[in-house]
């Protein structure tokens, strides 16, 4: 096993899962793993600009683009976890009914401010607002979190009344209550995958780490952090 640290870049959504899985891997293998978690757009940009990493963990569609441009090793991808979108309010605020599509639409229309991220969940919410025909109605109430800023933190600070983000990014955020998941009919499932970067000089070590990430041994860790095994 390589004595050099493996460098991993990921989006914020997987940071808790990766940190715990990397710690477990270091304990059993002796391989050091260094993880950088930033906004997904920022992570992809850094890879595209040639910054050297061994492994990248992003939503599958983002990896598709990186693979097309030759930034990851073709055939190296493994599925890590599935993530769904949840709805949050500030702790102690009255609960909102989000149990059905119509109830959620009504809750959005009543909210003074609506927050989402720049990632896959935010794109999905924007599309829902358009689908419901209310995008123009609520446009002045929308707060888009800056890349790397948890929507939950804006909810906790009272800057956002109704926040949408992947459950994995809300579950550990203090000062908020998760009122539910998006209803099944309009839920958005994001699959996060890992791949070996074309700049890696430790491809065998990277491959061994990817096998660990995809192993069923990590299933309970993924569940504990608001995700599900692939």
Image: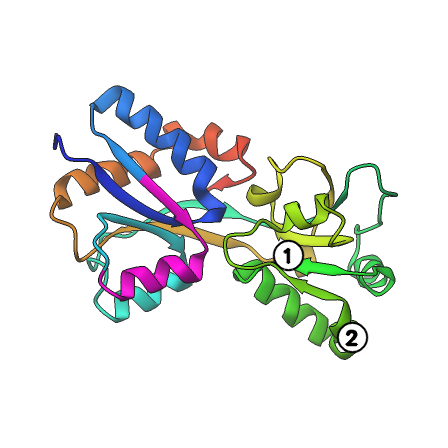
Q: Determine the image quadrant of residue 204.
A: top left
Of the two numbered discs 1 and 2 on the same chain, state the one appearing first in sequence: 2
Instruction: Check the picture and name the quadrant holding the C terminus.
Output: top left
Residue named by callout 1: 187
Please tell me whether mark 1 sits on a helix, a strand or a loop: loop
Above or below, 61 relative to 13: below
- Magenta residues, start to end: 35-50
Observer-nearest residue: 22 or 128? 22
Q: Quadrant of the N terminus?
A: top left
Q: Looking at the image, which is closer to me, 180 or 30? A: 30
The percent position of residue 29, horizontal first and vertical second, equals 21, 24
Q: Nearer the viewer, residue 225 or 12?
A: 12
**Mark 2 highlights which residue?**
134
Inspect the magenta stretch and tell me whether residue 112 lies in it: no
Q: Who's the residue at 35% across and 45% down the image?
A: 36
Query: Which residue is at a point 37% across and 50% down the rendered structure image?
Result: 193
Q: Is residue 45 magenta?
A: yes
Q: Secondary structure at mark 2?
A: loop
């Amino acid at each position: 096993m390589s004595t050099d640290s493996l460098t991993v870049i990921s989006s914020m959504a997987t940071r808790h899962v990766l940190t715990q899985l990397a710690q477990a891997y270091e304990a059993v293998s002796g391989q050091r793993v260094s993880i950088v978690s930033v906004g997904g757009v920022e992570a992809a940009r850094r890879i595209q600009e040639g910054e050297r990493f061994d492994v990248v963990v992003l939503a599958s569609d983002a990896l598709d683009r990186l693979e097309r441009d030759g930034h990851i090793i073709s055939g190296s991808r493994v599925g890590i976890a599935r993530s769904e979108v949840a709805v949050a309010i500030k702790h102690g605020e009255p609960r909102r009914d989000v149990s059905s599509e119509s109830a959620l639409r009504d809750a959005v229309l009543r909210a003074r401010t609506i927050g989402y991220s720049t990632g896959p969940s935010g794109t999905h919410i924007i599309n829902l607002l358009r689908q419901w025909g209310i995008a123009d109605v609520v446009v002045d109430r929308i707060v888009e979190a800056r890349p790397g800023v948890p929507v939950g933190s804006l909810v906790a600070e009272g800057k956002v009344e109704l926040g949408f983000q992947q459950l994995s990014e809300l579950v550990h955020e203090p000062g908020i209550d998760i009122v539910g998941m998006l209803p099944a009919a309009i839920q958005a499932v994001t699959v996060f995958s890992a791949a070996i970067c074309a700049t890696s000089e430790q491809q065998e070590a990277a491959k061994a780490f990817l096998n660990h990430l995809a192993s069923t041994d990590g299933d309970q860790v993924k569940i504990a952090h608001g995700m599900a095994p692939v």
